[in-house]
Image (tube, helix red, strand yellow):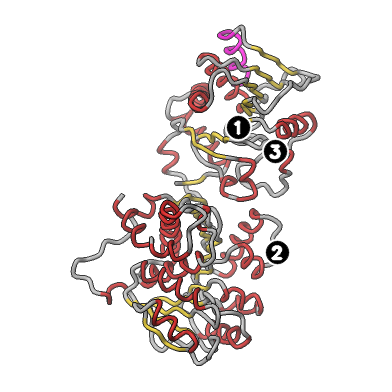
Amino acid sequence: MKLFTTEEIRAIERYTIENDGVSALELTERVAEGVANEVASRWRASKPTIVFAGPGNNGADALATSRLLSERGFHPEVYLFNIGGDKLSADCMAQRDRLLREVPEIAFHEVQSSFNMPKISQSHLIIDGLFGSGLCEELKGGFKSLVQYINEVNATVVSIDLPSGLFGDWNPQIVNRNTIHATLTLAIQFPRISFFISDNAELIGEWKLIDIGLSGAAIAGSAVNFCLVESRDVQHRLRQRNEFASKADFGSAVLYAGSYGMMGAAILAARGCLRGGVGKLTVNSPKCGYAVMQTAVPEALYRHNRGELNIVDIHPERSFNAIAIGPGIGTNELTVKALGDFLAATNQPVILDADALNCIALKPSVLNSIPVLSVITPHAGEFDRLFGPQPSAEARLRKAIEMAKYYNILIVLKGRYTAIVRPDGKVYFNSSGCPAMATPGSGDVLTGLLLAMLAQGYPAELASLVAVYIHGVAGEMAAAEHGEYGVTATDIAENIGRAIRDVASK
């Protein structure tokens, strides 16, 4: 799914109005119909309801929603903010007049100067139509006080388009207490980029889309830098296997992983790779890992490293289709040197994860040696060790966009909506996965799965997209079986094959 910036969405709305014969008021009606239907499906009409409408088009949506809720048996009390008496947009004014004409008995207050806060309790339903994507500055004065009050009473809040105070794209200066904390955000047509950044999760709450029929031609013809990866995006990219295929058709991979006391990471990565369909996997580990690997993962070839307890050299003995380095290798001085020497000597893209990233953090100059179109897969802590502490998840993502371009690499920034950041500035947020995947070793499984996709000939950009999505589906399957508390990384690895099967067959 394409994710549009606020300006891009406005352009699509303008195109729809100018080319599809749809008026702005009709679009407002479609928004209100969607909001009213969603509210009526979740709450009884007897629930005390207060609607706060701002002076712009978000307020117009809220006023139209008030009218439709009245038709459905609700009795909303409506506050329209028109400070000074001449601030309403044309659409907002039209919706105000229609509301008062068609529902004359409604409890309606048009605030033009002073405002007495209504009494709100936890039992109230609040429809937040103060400010949507048209907001261009932080909330101030009375609006800020109103938002803080709404947040303090902990009522149920439904925000139209966006929680008031939140911007659709970037929010570098946001103050959470000055922004509506929505229970449910009903986004118009598209989710916003800000929905996929963990800083904003408590503000957005649950989110759901309202389809208002914006121009399909405009949507299809618009190039974007942000996308949400969904099942259909992966399904048609998964390659079907020829019935006469042999393991030689599915690539050879080498995984440098493990150290004394950390062989579990090597096992998990190897299992992820094998379940991902690699033709042949070689695991290169210290000598101490021989019995462990041969017993736990007999399907993988084992090559012992010169080191007894740690990896001390990285020199693939032959050509491999894909190389991954990092799970459980530790940060021994000899390991750090071996990684630096290898990266300086190779031009082949590699996957770098876990301790490989921690090794580079100890010697940051190695960043300059990472081959073009390599893939690094940091979680937040590993990313900050590599590129410096970041004050927020949004700052980290923006830094990732900068660093992917600077070093010409792909960055898989792991989290709830793992972001696949490409060197051309495009960002793909992953939609699959669940909280059960916040378990030790989950990232090692992802490294193995990504290695398998690269070995099978998927380009790095596509391999990252497919692997991250399949990994999330496997986690969902594991959670369905074991519950969110009971999932282990082994469970995720064991479900990879089923996840590929199910996604490919949809």
Q: Earlier in the sequence, mark 1 or mark 2?
A: 1
Q: Is residue 51 left or right of residue 227?
A: right
Q: Looking at this view, is 254 or 75 the one in front? A: 75
Residue at the image position 48 percent from the left and 80 percent from the top: 256
Checking the image for residue 65, the label placed there is none
**Picture coordinates of residue 39 (x, y %)?**
53, 26
Which residue was labeled with disc 2? 389
Look at label 3 and name its amino acid: Thr
State how many labels appear: 3
Which residue was labeled with disc 3? 179
Q: Is residue 407 above or below residue 487?
A: below
- Residue extending farthest left: 244
Query: In which quarter of the view is residue 161 placed?
Result: top right
Give the Cα separation between the discs numbered 3 and 1: 11 Å
**Picture coordinates of residue 457 (x, y %)?**
35, 70
Dot 1 alpha-carbon crowd within 10 angstroms: few under 14, some 14 to 19, many 20 or more: many
Residue at the image position 53 percent from the left and 61 percent from the top: 439
Q: Looking at this view, is 195 or 42 the one in front? A: 42
Q: Is residue 278 left or right of residue 420?
A: left
Residue at the image position 62 percent from the left and 33 percent from the top: 132
Q: Is residue 103 above or below residue 238?
A: above
Look at label 2 and name its amino acid: Pro
- In the rendered structure, which segment of residues is drawn in magenta? 91-103
Which residue was labeled with disc 1? 159
Query: In which quarter of the view is residue 406 placed?
Result: bottom right
Look at label 1 and name its amino acid: Ser
**Picture coordinates of residue 15 (x, y %)?**
48, 34
Query: Under tag 3, what secondary structure?
Result: loop
